[in-house]
Image (tube, rainbow, N blue to C red):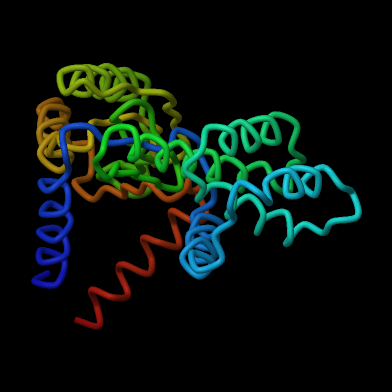
């Protein structure tokens, strides 16, 4: 518990240190691919491309004989150039990119935009990316909630209550419900929520409000901004959590 509290404090400290304006990656991109991109970008900073090599790089991006890994390297190098022409090259390539490199080109396009903005504004820009993306200054989250009776499905009245109350609490915090579904004893949802708002407090209030009508909603909640979980993954997570508690 102490470790979890320290982790939350560290995250909150990082959030509190954000400038008023920051950029959120809107697209949903696998987190492992994001790590691979930024790892390559970090390693290749010493190999930055200059404008004189841009024409050759542009041609190679569209050359079928150039392999996928080399095209990834070219996009990373182009993204580091403080030049609108480099941004336009990446933008044009992204519009027609195959699925195997589409997400990579999104990251390159975002980085290129940040490089140019930093130069024009004279200050470092902050870029926030998660597996589920976001919108504006809102982060997209996936949540799984459970019936208090682990073997009982939500009835129609409970379903309507959960959805209406969840929409209300999100709207009060400038959030937005995008998806909600009920499956067995679970309710899952995808929603947008302001990064600076206290997500934990909102969920506590929401659950307390629902439970005024029968204590049917468990206080155990799974929230992630990495990926959407299916029912089997949710069950596995719950079982792993229970095993961890028993070991403690």
Q: Is 165 in front, or is 123?
A: 123
Image check: 145 left or right of 212?
A: right
Instruction: Say which quadrant the N terminus sits in.
Output: bottom left
Image check: 26 left or right of 243?
A: right
Q: Is 209 in front, or is 113?
A: 113
Q: Position of residue 204 (x, y in %)?
A: 12, 39
Image check: 226 left or right of 11?
A: right
What residue is shown at x 31% (from left), y 67% (from top)? 241
Question: Please, which residue is most extreme toward the bottom here?
Answer: 247
Q: Is 31 in front, or is 239?
A: 31
Q: Position of residue 49 (x, y in %)?
A: 59, 56
Question: Please, which residue is most extreme toward the right here?
Answer: 65
Q: Quadrant of residue 248?
A: bottom left
Q: Quadrant of residue 162?
A: top left
Q: Position of residue 111 (x, y in %)?
A: 46, 44
Q: Position of residue 80 (x, y in %)?
A: 50, 50
Q: Is 125 in front, or is 137?
A: 125
What residue is shown at x 14% (from left), y 61% (from top)? 10
Q: Is residue 114 above or below residue 2?
A: above
């Amino acid at each position: 518990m102490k470790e979890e509290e320290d982790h939350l404090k560290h995250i909150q400290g990082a959030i509190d240190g954000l400038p008023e304006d920051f950029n959120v990656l809107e697209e949903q991109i696998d987190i492992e691919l994001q790590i691979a991109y930024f790892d390559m970008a970090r390693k290749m900073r010493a190999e930055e491309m200059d404008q004189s090599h841009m024409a050759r790089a542009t041609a190679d991006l569209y050359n079928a004989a150039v392999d996928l890994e080399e095209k990834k390297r070219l996009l990373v190098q182009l993204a580091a150039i403080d030049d609108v022409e480099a941004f336009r090259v990446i933008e044009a390539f992204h519009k027609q990119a195959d699925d195997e490199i589409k997400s990579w080109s999104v990251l390159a396009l975002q980085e290129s935009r940040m490089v140019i903005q930093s130069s024009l504004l004279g200050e470092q820009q902050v870029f926030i990316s998660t597996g589920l993306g976001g919108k504006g200054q809102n982060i997209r989250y996936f949540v799984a909630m459970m019936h208090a009776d682990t073997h009982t499905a939500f009835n129609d009245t409970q379903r309507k209550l959960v959805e209406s109350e969840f929409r209300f609490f999100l709207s009060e915090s400038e959030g937005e419900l995008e998806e909600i579904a009920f499956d067995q004893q679970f309710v899952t949802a995808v929603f947008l929520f302001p990064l600076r708002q206290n997500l934990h407090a909102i969920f506590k209030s929401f659950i307390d409000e629902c439970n005024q009508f029968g204590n049917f909603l468990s206080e155990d909640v799974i929230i992630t901004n990495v990926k959407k979980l299916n029912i089997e993954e949710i069950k596995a997570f719950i079982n792993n959590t229970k095993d961890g508690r028993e070991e403690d």
